[in-house]
Amino acid sequence: MLMGSAFAQGTAAPAAPAAKTEKAEKAHTPESLECSKQADEKGLHGKERKKFRSECKKQAKGAARNKLPPGRKPDNEPVQAAPAV
């Protein structure tokens, strides 16, 4: 009788972790969404679409950098050390 209860405990299938079955959705930037919209309008697909979106997002980032107030650098740009006297 003891063998039956021990056997029943070992036969349960392990539950699959929820993290592996669900992908975390990434938030899309406004630039990314705009580039996707432009690619849709041009009817681009596959490699051409990927290349277009990549270039479009690079240009959008460059335009965003130009909008910073004078003297302010983007957060991801390294700060240069002052020259030694």
Image: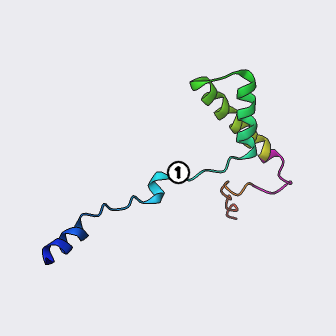
Q: Residue at image x 33%, y 62%? A: 14
Residue at the limit of the structure toward the right, as seen here: 69
Query: Does 72 appear in magenta?
Result: yes
In the figure, is residue 47 to the left or right of 62?
A: left
Task: Looking at the picture, tell me which residue is in the foreground, 27 or 20.
Answer: 20
Q: Is residue 63 above or below residue 77?
A: above
Which quarter of the rendering shows the C terminus?
bottom right
Q: Amino acid at mark 1?
A: Lys
In the figure, is residue 66 to the left or right of 58?
A: right
In the figure, is residue 9 to the left or right of 1?
A: right
Which x, y percent locates residue 50? Answer: 61, 30
Q: Mark 1 packing: few (<14 Cα in 10 Å), some, or many (20+)? A: few
Q: Residue at image x 24%, y 63%? A: 11
The magenta stretch spans which residues? 65-73
Task: Looking at the picture, tell me which residue is in the foreground, 47 or 72.
Answer: 47
Residue that numbered label 1 is attached to: 23
Q: Residue at image x 75%, y 45%? A: 30
Q: Main secondary structure of the magenta part?
A: loop
In the figure, is residue 1 to the left or right of 18?
A: left
Residue at the limit of the structure toward the top, as seen here: 43
Which x, y percent locates residue 79? Answer: 68, 59
Q: Identify the element where label 1 is drawn.
A: loop
Which quarter of the rendering shows the N terminus?
bottom left
Query: Does 55 appear in magenta?
Result: no
Q: Residue at image x 25%, y 70%? A: 9
Picture colour scheme = rainbow
Which x, y percent locates residue 82? Answer: 70, 62
